[in-house]
Image (cartoon, grey):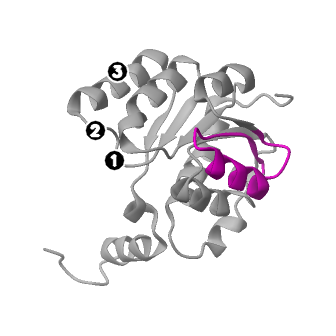
Amino acid sequence: MNDYIDRRDFIKTFSILAGASMVAGSMPWLKSVNAQGTSKVVRLGMIGTGSRGMHLHLFLKDIPNLDICCICDNYEPNLKIAQEAVGPNARAYSDYRVMLEKEKPDAVIIATPLHQHAHITIDALKAGIHVFCEKSMAKTIEDCNAMVQTHLDTGKILYIGHQRIFNIKYQQAYKMINEGRLGPVT
């Protein structure tokens, strides 16, 4: 990575990525955002390039200061489709551990089947990489606790995506409630 990114700039940019990845509708407001003016580049890896992973890519591809540097999927047809969509600059891997070791991205998005979330998240955090993991967090409470503990032990960001929190329709509803435009909500 040529440009150093500090924790504060990363949090700003990663929060934008998190919101972008969860919005199901159009996002005209996102295209104008460039990580609050930072010129630093976030190197992002995508683990899981099936339907959810490719859906996320569509929202991420035009974000300024974001480099999808690597992609990973253990299902060859999905990896091939993702490579064509993301482009040749993103290196493709079939083993996420090899990708994490060779690429050392700033962050990864994990969009794999649920039973893989915990061990991939823990491995990424231990490798010093921030994580945005699709919901649901993990399959068991024990796995969720292990993910949180690894986050605390490493000091790396662990962000769990929840679609409706970032959906522009719900954001508008929250705003209307907070402004008192709907009266008491019970």
Q: Position of residue 94 (x, y in %)?
A: 64, 34
The residue stretch that appears in magenta = 65-91
Q: Which residue is mark 3?
A: 149
- Residue 81, magenta (yes or no): yes
Q: Is residue 39 above or below residue 22?
A: above
User: What is the residue that sits farthest to the left in this orientation?
Assistant: 186
Q: Is residue 76 left or right of residue 92?
A: left
- Residues at badges 2 and 1 in contact (C-beta under 8 Å)? yes
Choose mark 3 or mark 2, whichever is in front. Answer: 2
Q: Position of residue 28 (x, y in %)?
A: 65, 75
Q: Position of residue 33 (x, y in %)?
A: 70, 61
Query: How dense is the environment of label 1, judged by Cα within 10 Å: few (below 14), some, or many (20 and up)?
Result: some
Q: Which residue is mark 2?
A: 139
Element marked by disc 3:
helix
The numbered mark, 3 or 2, whose residue comes first in the sequence reads 2
Q: Is residue 16 above or below residue 103?
A: below
| Disc 2 to disc 1, C-alpha distance | 8 Å
Residue appearing at x 60%, y 51% in the figure: 17
Question: What residue type is disc 2 on?
Answer: Lys
